[in-house]
Image (cartoon, rainbow, N blue to C red):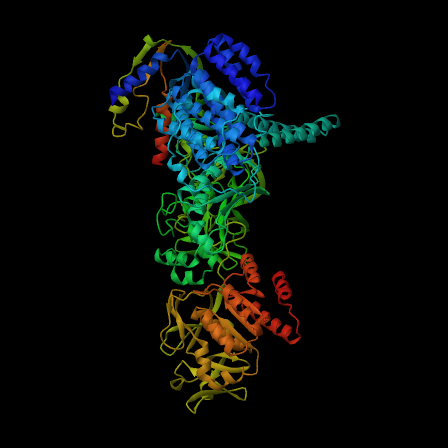
Amino acid sequence: MNTSAECQSSTAADQLKQIFTIQVGNEWFGIPIDNVRTIFRTRKITPVPLAPVAVAGLVNVRGEVLTAIYAASCLDVANFKCGDELLIIGIEHHSESFGLIVSQAGDILDVQDEETILLPNNKQASGKSSNNNAASPHRASLPTYKKNGQYYPVIDMDAFFNALNSDSQAA
Amino acid sequence: MACTRFLAGACRLTLSCAGYLSRCYSLAVDIPHTSIGRRLGLFWFQVANLMSAGRAMEELLNDFLTEATDQIDQVERQIVQFEQDPSDAEAIAQIFRLVHTLKGTSGFLELPRLERVTHAAETLLGRVRKSGAATPRQVDAVLQTIDTIQEILTGLETSGSEPEGEDDLLIEALKAAVEDSELEQAPSADSLSADALSGHVDESPGRPPSEAQLLPPVQEHTPAKPNRMGNQTGSGSIRVMISTIERIMRLVSELVLTRNQLLELAREESSDTMSAPLQRLSAITTDLQDGIMKARMQRIDRLFASLPRMVRELGQELNKSITLVVEGSDTELDRQLIEHLRDPLLHLIRNCVDHGIEDRATRSQSKKPENGTITVTASQEGGFISIRISDDGRGIDHQRIRDQVIAKKLAPEDQIALMDNDEICRFIFAPGFSTAQSVSNISGRGIGMDVVRANIESIGGNVSLTTTPGQGTTFIMKVPLTLAIIPALIFEVGAQRFAIPQNSVVEAVTCDDGEKSRVVRAQGSNLLQIRDQNIILADFKELCNFDPGNSAGEFPGTEITAQAQDASRPANDSLAIIAKVGALQFAIEVDRVLDVQEIVVKPLSSPLTQVRMFAGNTILGDGSVVLIVNPTGVADLIGLDSAKHYTASTPWEELPQEKEATSFVLFRDADGIQKGVPLSLLSRIEEIDSVNIAHSDGQVVVHHNNTLMPVIDLANSVNKTGQLPVLVIGVGGEPMGLIVSEIIDIVEHQLEIDIAGRTPGIIGTTEIRGAVTSILDITHFMRTARPGEFERRHAKRFRVLVVDDKPFFRDMLAPLIAASGYDTKTASSAADAIIQIKRGTYDIILTDLDMPDVNGYELAKMIREIPRYAKTPIMALDAFAGREVVEAAAEAGMDGVVGKFDRELLITCLRDTFEATAFNTSNIEARMEKDKAA
């Protein structure tokens, strides 16, 4: 299981050349640049009752409705706080529109495959979800880049949304 | 014709020498007046372009596939049209051209299988074109060809290369079919060009006739001509990607929002210079919105195009000859809906062919034309499209359905007994229902009709049927015009707004106004009591888990104001929205109902599709996103299962009619057993001192108001003293009483007898308020208490005959009518009724409609044939006097329909009838109209 996940992510990493960085809580992440559409702030969000906890609600961005998701919830980031105004990164995944609620938007970084570091798999070792690999945090085996002294794990979008969907099935 | 030949020549040139491509193009575009020619020209133009641009063959193939699929749709339509009208030379020429086009391009694209098949088909079509008429065998062969072509094209689309397959049989069939034309008509000199085109096909003459020839000829005459179509397709239209339309849609809704904001601003600043152009902008925006909505619409044609062939093939398979008449194929509806309608429509038509239309022998026996007719009609009615599918077949056997319903325990038997034929028929749509005696591969596997219903209901529509035994069945599907824009009721819970589709909303009422509606708690859930109905009431907040600390709990920083904090329910000012899903009703408690708006439905993203409570979202005028409530999902959440709770009541237009409750007086007899008697049969309730009770001549009588009244002593009053309650029953002005031990209450209860009575004086047993209750048979007591009176008093009165197969109704109605002063006799069947009618003289006949053997309609016709009863009023008794029933009753020669439970109308009706008889005028209908209006 572990090996296959590593294989997948390393092949994904081969194709990545640019990432968009975001800060969630105190941690930084990268998103494949191809997925990013817009960045905006909003106060108006429509909560969806009975939705998975990671779903914050629906937001209208210029006539398009996107589903806003707490990135922190999917990435297992603790201590995430946000005020009335939400910072949202609009992304597209399988031709559906989503918004990731983040703490701070960073820059576009050029990265090269050689810079990939595989972090030790401490999340799974911690045993939080050792029996539940499908929904387990994707951070554990994410390809990570080091730039200017900062580590940027790059989110695997498919895994990210799979986890969200399996969450919602469980719920 | 000349054009085509010319074109064919041009194509050949192309095949042999790619260098001539450009010239070929210039030739092709010169061909006027045929859309095919133009398309072909376009295609070759593309070929030329592509070749020069050096684009891959793959893309070329894709273009070809798109074009070919379209063209095949046209061929199918044309060929059935041709078959129905063999003199339609234009149709066959069109088919020929299309096949020819396919042949040419398949050769160019190196698709040998396709080329071989189309080549053989072209030869055949060339002959047919000349002979001017296609034999069924030829039509079969061509249809088979189309199937093969489609199969190859599908393979091409998925794999990029021709699928493996053996076409020899088909080619043989095509070649054999060519001879049909030769037998009929020797090739003329004119056929030279076709022979030149067909080439080597003629090498193998003298094939034995295939089995297709043994098939009986399909209908040669068509009573009604289906719409001619297809001629105008292709010209004046362009192909647009759906995503493009969707994008324009989105931009238009954005524009609408911006316009609204502008209007708001202008209003605040009251600037005159701005207002005129703003008005214009506003009007144009609205027009634009309409325009783009129209662009999403498609003719229902698309759905109907495949029907003629399907009906034809099914007919052949079952050895029935069937004519399909299609009307209103130019009706437009949203393209999304067309796909949703396809399966239900096909299923219903299969049913008509398989079960509806009888075989030839049966048809000729019942003096019907051998040729069955299925009519499919589409029409727009307001915001709905209705599609009617009718056949002139055997209709549906009510009794068989009734038996099935009973056998499968789809409803309690006593309820079934109360249902009329229309209601019973609706069980066809219940899950797991099938009356087909034999299972065929066409229909009758017990799956389907419930799926049809579920599919149609899932898009906010409904399906119903009417049937007349021996004359046919009509199914009616009614669906909204579009799924994209629907009227919705906007309501508010906490600070959040929601939308619910208007077509599932029955009404919005105040939860507890203390008068018309009130909320009671029963078995852990709230019930909304309104107009004698009990509707389950769910708090929207509870359904949504609107609970502080739950939804947004994990991230307290993002506390959203819309989350209602107040979990306690406001007592009086909250509202209930009564919604329905199919026949199921429930109420949702909300804080405020705002208004009804046309909303643009947008789907929810995939992580939210699990939330069954919501069906989508929309953006309101102020730019806020609002969730659209899914009524089916809500019903599931509440715990109502629409599939299990399927009842036969009418969905849609009106509220499902609740069975009218009857008021019962509940009392205890000497043994303390709870008994009931319909309040309508009592004239009053009195208290009588036990000293006034006397036993004389084997009878019990009471002194009351200086008269003696016979009573039945149910209280064993001999052992009692003091005041005793007496139920006074009026028999034509002569009262009789029932002494009871204790009167418990007067309750409303639906007349449903669970166990039929065995002892005299008891009609049956039912459960009222959780207690077993015997319902008294008042007639029995009247006969006992006033044996002479009961008969004698009515001898000189008007005579009424009540015909009903169910003893319960006879026993209920007879005393009721008798109590009004009429001499009443009952008959338990039509046969019984006829005997009584012939023996005696009756002034009016009241008959149940739904009886075994001979139903009420037939009975009415039989009565009318007896000369002295030609003008005697006949009234139908029906549980619900629906319009369909009224019409059918009038047709059978009846004078009107009265609801079985509508005591007042029944009595009024009788009185009016007798008055009319007395004055020799018949104004029952007028009276009934008036009563209804009142």
Can see residue B85? Answer: yes
Residue B726, how many percent across, how many down?
Answer: 47, 80
The quadrant of the image that shows the C terminus of chain B is: bottom right
Q: Is residue B99 left or right of residue B409?
A: right
Residue at 50 percent of width and 85 percent of height: B789
Residue B518, how many percent across, how many down?
Answer: 50, 56
Residue B528, how many percent across, how many down?
Answer: 48, 54
Nearer to me, B299 or B146: B146
Residue B919, how many percent across, how many down?
Answer: 67, 75
Figure label count: 0
- Residue lying at the far right in this picture: please name it: B272
Question: Which picture quadrant has residue B842?
Answer: bottom right
Residue at 37 percent of width and 72 percent of height: B757
The quadrant of the image that shows the N terminus of chain B is: top right
- Residue lying at the far bottom in this picture: please name it: B697
Reply above or below: B688 against B2: below
Reply above or below: B35 against B901: above
Question: Which picture quadrant has residue B915?
Answer: bottom right
Nearer to me, B379 or B337: B379
Nearer to me, B186 or B835: B186
Can see residue B520? Answer: no
Q: Is residue B922 left or right of residue B440?
A: right
